[in-house]
Every structure is written in C-alpha cells, then in structure tokens.
Image (cartoon, helix red, strand yellow):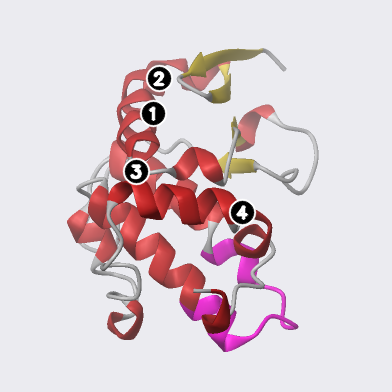
Amino acid sequence: MKTTCFKIQEFQVCLHEQNLPARPSIQKSINRLQKVGISSLLTTISDDAAVERGLPRNGEAFIIVDSGPYDSENVANSLEESIAWQVVSAATTDRCIDKTKTIESHDLNSAIAHDLLKRAKYTNLAEHISPEVNSTFAHMNERELNSFLHTQNKLITSCSLENKTL
C-alpha cells in the first residue's frame, strides 16, 4: 500500500496515493480547524485507506476520502466539509460511542464539536448538532477556548468531561 505523509501546520497527514488529489480540500479544512483549536485534541489525520489497523491511536483521526457526489442526504456538501465533519467528530463525539460514557459528557463533547465547526465557519455542519448544547462554549473567546481544549484534552478525548469542569 503506497502512502504519502506530509505536514499541514501541526498535523501529520497520511493519505493513500489514490487520494492525493484530495490534498487541497483536506489542507483547506485542516487550516480552518487549526485556527479554532483542533490541534489541542488531534495531531494525526490518517486516510482510512492508508492504515492497516482497526482503530485510531490517541490523538489520531481516521478519515474516509470521498470525492462525492454530495446530495441532500449528506450532512456535508463537499469534500472539504466532509473532512471537517470527520475530523471534529473524531476528536469529540466519536470518543463517546462507548456505552459507559455519560450523556453529560457526550453533550459537552457535542457542544465542543458545534463550537469548533461554527468558529471555523462550517455553520451548516454545526447546525446538525443537537440544539440543546450549542451555546455551552459561546461565552469563551478563541484564546479561552483554545486554552480550555488544551488543558482539558484528556477529559475531552476520553469523553469524561463534566459540567463541574467548566
């Protein structure tokens, strides 16, 4: 399997050679998410077609590079949006799939996902996250949110965040 790895700011990105044409869309998505703090939660993004293990490591997101077509059935309307959705989900809500995680922790991770997508100007994606959690982090400016994501990284990526942590 031929894989190419490269850096996008602080991220290590590895793509299967057949998905290299998607690099500009992936780069644009990562750049927008980087500006709003996603690097506090992830360091590596790997193309699902380029890995031979079942689960991502800590700090890693697996993405499926699908060039479309995109229609009204999809949350994302483009490859760039699809990558943003997958990366943010991998860092937040996907961590809460385990049935032992609490609803409170899932809702807080959903609120983080909403805020990251909204701040990265993926408003249509952010709107697909439960409206009850949408304003949890709205009071934080970018610096405060980045600091929170950095200091609470372990609780967020293990889906163990609680309201008392806020």
Q: Say whether residue 101 is left or right of residue 42.
A: right
Q: Secondary structure at mark 2?
A: helix
Q: Residue at x 34, y 43 (%)?
A: 36
Instruction: Say which of 77 and 18 sits in front.
Output: 77
Amino acid type indicated by mark 4: Asn
Q: Residue at x 60, y 43 (%)?
A: 61
Instruction: Say which of 160 and 75 sits in front.
Output: 160
Q: Which residues are magenta?
A: 93-107
Q: Which residue is mark 1?
A: 26
Q: Which residue is mark 2?
A: 23
- Taking the view exactly as shown, the residue that stands out farthest to the right is 53
Q: Say whether residue 95 is left or right of residue 65.
A: right
Tag 3–tag 2 contact (CB < 8 Å): no
* Distance of label 3 from label 2 (alpha carbons): 20 Å
Q: Say whether residue 86 is left or right of residue 28.
A: right
Instruction: Check disc 2: other Cα within 10 Å, few if <14, some if 14-19, many if 20+.
Output: some
* Distance of label 3 from label 4 (alpha carbons): 14 Å
How many labels sit on residues?
4
Q: Which residue is mark 3?
A: 36
Above or below for 30 versus 107: above
From the top left corner, tell me how far across and down residue 120 is, in percent.
Answer: 26, 45
Q: Secondary structure at mark 1?
A: helix
Q: Which residue is mark 4?
A: 153
Mark 3 or 2, nearer chain start: 2
From the top left corner, tell me how far across and down residue 92 is, in percent.
Answer: 53, 60
Q: Nearer the viewer, mark 1 or mark 4?
A: 4
Amino acid type indicated by mark 2: Arg
